Image: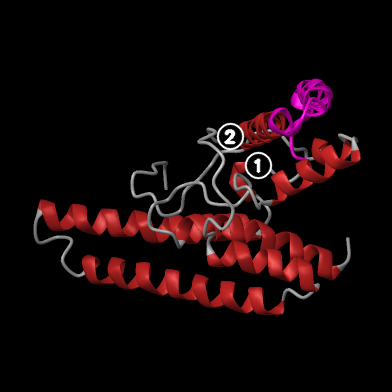
């Protein structure tokens, strides 16, 4: 793997973590479940071509047979007229996205309409792939990571000054300490290749990896 591919791989992993870190609701964020996202776009192209091959990459190997069968049924039904085609296509899109998200370890919550906003870093990741340049994305991520580390460090350092004044003050320090340490830990593990987009391990699609959430104060393990 050359240097550019290694950098792109690490940036992709880091985007997955930072999409969680930088958005307040902490939900699994991406555009794989939108009507103008890459999964549905590939599904539309596959249906028009009558070839399922282009969508199989979006599901784990264990789900491949189900998608093949659903695709074949969809081709039969969509030939019955415009209304049947619309319903058959939508059902196939929903099935494909549901199995895709299940392979990532997330629940299917329905297809979102085209134009649904996506996290800025995810949009930048798509733009980087489209333009063939990762420079702008790498700079934005570096700035975001530094800001995140400094923010949590400042909170922990300030809380540390008062941690022995009372039990309540001590607990505030522990909460700030956990957020700081696990944010740094989560970013480091992602950059080193131990994390992946949507909780998927680097490697074979469909195998699950622990989904550490660097921002979650309730995350617990021995230090």
Q: Is residue 168 left or right of residue 204?
A: left
Q: Which residue is mark 1?
A: 200
Instruction: Name the colouring of the figure.
Output: secondary structure
Q: Which residue is mark 2?
A: 105
Q: Is residue 195 visible?
A: no
Q: Is residue 120 left or right of residue 128?
A: left
- Does residue 66 belong to the magenta stretch? yes
**How far across and how far down the image is residue 143, in percent?**
53, 78
Q: Which type of secondary structure does the marked residue at label 1 adopt?
A: loop
How many labels were placed on the picture?
A: 2
**How far across and how far down the image is residue 111, in percent?**
57, 40
Q: Are marks 2 and 1 in contact (CB under 8 Å)?
A: yes
Report the magenta stretch's main SS: helix
Binning the other alpha carbons within 10 Å of mark 1 as few (below 14), some (14 to 19) or many (20 upward) gives many
Q: Which type of secondary structure does the marked residue at label 2 adopt?
A: loop
The quadrant of the image that shows the N terminus is: bottom right
Q: Earlier in the sequence, mark 2 or mark 1?
A: 2
Residue drawn 45% across the image and 63% down it: 22
Nearest the viewer among 198 and 108 is 108
Q: Which mark is residue 175?
A: none
Q: Is residue 18 left or right of residue 195?
A: left
- Does residue 11 belong to the magenta stretch? no
Q: Which residues are magenta?
A: 58-85
Residue drawn 77% across the image and 68% down it: 130
Residue at far left of view = 166
**How far across and how far down the image is residue 220, in percent?**
39, 42
**How far across and how far down the image is residue 213, in percent?**
47, 48
């Amino acid at each position: 793997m050359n240097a550019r591919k290694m950098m792109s791989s690490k940036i992709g992993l880091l985007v997955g973590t930072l999409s969680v870190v930088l958005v307040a609701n902490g939900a699994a964020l991406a555009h794989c479940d939108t009507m103008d996202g890459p999964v549905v776009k590939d599904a539309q192209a596959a249906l028009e071509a009558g070839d399922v091959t282009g969508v199989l990459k979006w599901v784990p190997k264990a789900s491949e047979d189900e998608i093949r069968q659903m695709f074949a049924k969809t081709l039969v039904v969509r030939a019955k007229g415009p209304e049947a085609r619309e319903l058959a296509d939508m059902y196939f899109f929903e099935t494909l996205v549901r199995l895709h998200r299940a392979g990532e370890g997330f629940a299917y919550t329905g297809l979102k309409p085209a134009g649904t906003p996506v996290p800025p870093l995810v949009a930048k990741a798509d733009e980087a792939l489209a333009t063939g340049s990762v420079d702008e994305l790498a700079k934005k991520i570096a700035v975001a990571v530094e800001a995140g580390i400094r923010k949590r460090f400042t909170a922990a350092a300030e809380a540390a000054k008062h941690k022995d004044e009372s039990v309540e003050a001590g607990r505030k320090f522990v909460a700030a300490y956990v957020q700081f340490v696990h944010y740094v830990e989560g970013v480091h593990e992602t950059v080193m290749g131990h994390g992946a987009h949507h909780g998927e391990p680097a490697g074979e699609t469909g195998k699950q990896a622990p989904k550490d959430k660097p921002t979650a104060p309730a995350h617990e393990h021995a230090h």
